Image (spheres, rainbow, N blue to C red):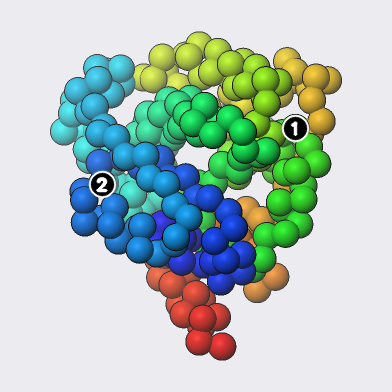
Amino acid sequence: MTGVQTCALPIYHGSEHMIYLCTRDLNEEQIIKLKSLYSNIIISNKEINFDLISKRANMSKEKILELKKHIETDAVTKNTFLWKQAISVEDRYRTSIVEAMDNYPNEDYLIHFDMDMYFRKPLHDLFETIRNNDISIKFRLKSKISRKVMGGLIGFRICKETREFMNRWIYYIDKIPLYEKPLGYGQSSFYYAYKDLEKEYKWGQVRSQYISPRFEEDDFIWSGNTKSGKVINLKKCRDDFNKRRNC
């Protein structure tokens, strides 16, 4: 979904916003292609240590690769979510967000996006929400513990205080070993940190239209993380992108 995401942003915002991609196992050709899509892009590409993940997951490397392929082309299920916990929770949430903050400490704010998201309209209101709050996320506080927040889009002011929040979140991420992490633990662990520090920060509510799995016309961002699967959702996003580009 990355190509759609990176192509869509300059249509509405030019090159004013830096895109910082934390990628894994890209080859040189893929990196060159991504950089050709947008002028203000930084790519931090690292290798995946499958042996380490296999050890932490208490699962064979062959099985890990099988789960990886399923989630990248289809949808997260109760039988395959362990790979998502490894690459999304223990790598992306735990490492990549802090890495971006550390590498660009003088930026005002950071918005974390899932990779499988498609920008359909200008994001001015979203940027305003992020600027005016310490931490912003889509809250669903009446839902069960693993769904009280939506972790696909999170905004942070880059400052000492939000780094302290990240330390608390990482504490909960590390509290349960990979092979025991339940489905949705990335969002659950964020919520635990939120409850600990709820009174310490100004919290922003991200509107549903900015992280929408419904694929509706009034949505600003479509999320590819639905039961339909990544391949089907990518086609929907590309069709919509081509239609809008040709208008």
Choose the circle earlier in sequence order: 1 or 2: 2
10 Å neighbourhood of mark 2: few (<14), some, or many (≥20)?
A: few
Image coords of residue 98 (percent x, y):
52, 27
- The answer to whether residue 183 shows anywhere in this view is no
Image coords of residue 214 (percent x, y):
61, 62
Residue at 28% in and 24% down? 53
Image coords of residue 65 (percent x, y):
22, 38
Residue 20 vs 211, above or below: the answer is above
Q: What amino acid type is highlighted by mark number 1?
A: Asp
10 Å neighbourhood of mark 1: few (<14), some, or many (≥20)?
A: many
Q: CA distance from mark 1 to mark 2?
A: 33 Å
Mark seen at residue 26 = 2
Residue 42 vs 184, above or below: the answer is below
What is the quadrant of residue 63 in the picture?
top left
Mark seen at residue 134 = 1
Of the pair 232 and 239, the residue shown nearer to us: 239
Residue at 72% in and 59% down? 124
Image coords of residue 32 (percent x, y):
28, 57
> Outermost residue, front direction?
106
Q: Quadrant of the N terminus?
A: bottom left
Residue at 30% in and 61% down? 33
Of the pair 238 and 214, the residue shown nearer to us: 238
What is the quadrant of residue 178 in the picture?
top left
Q: What amino acid type is highlighted by mark number 2?
A: Leu
Drawn side of residue 186 relative to residue 110, left or right: left
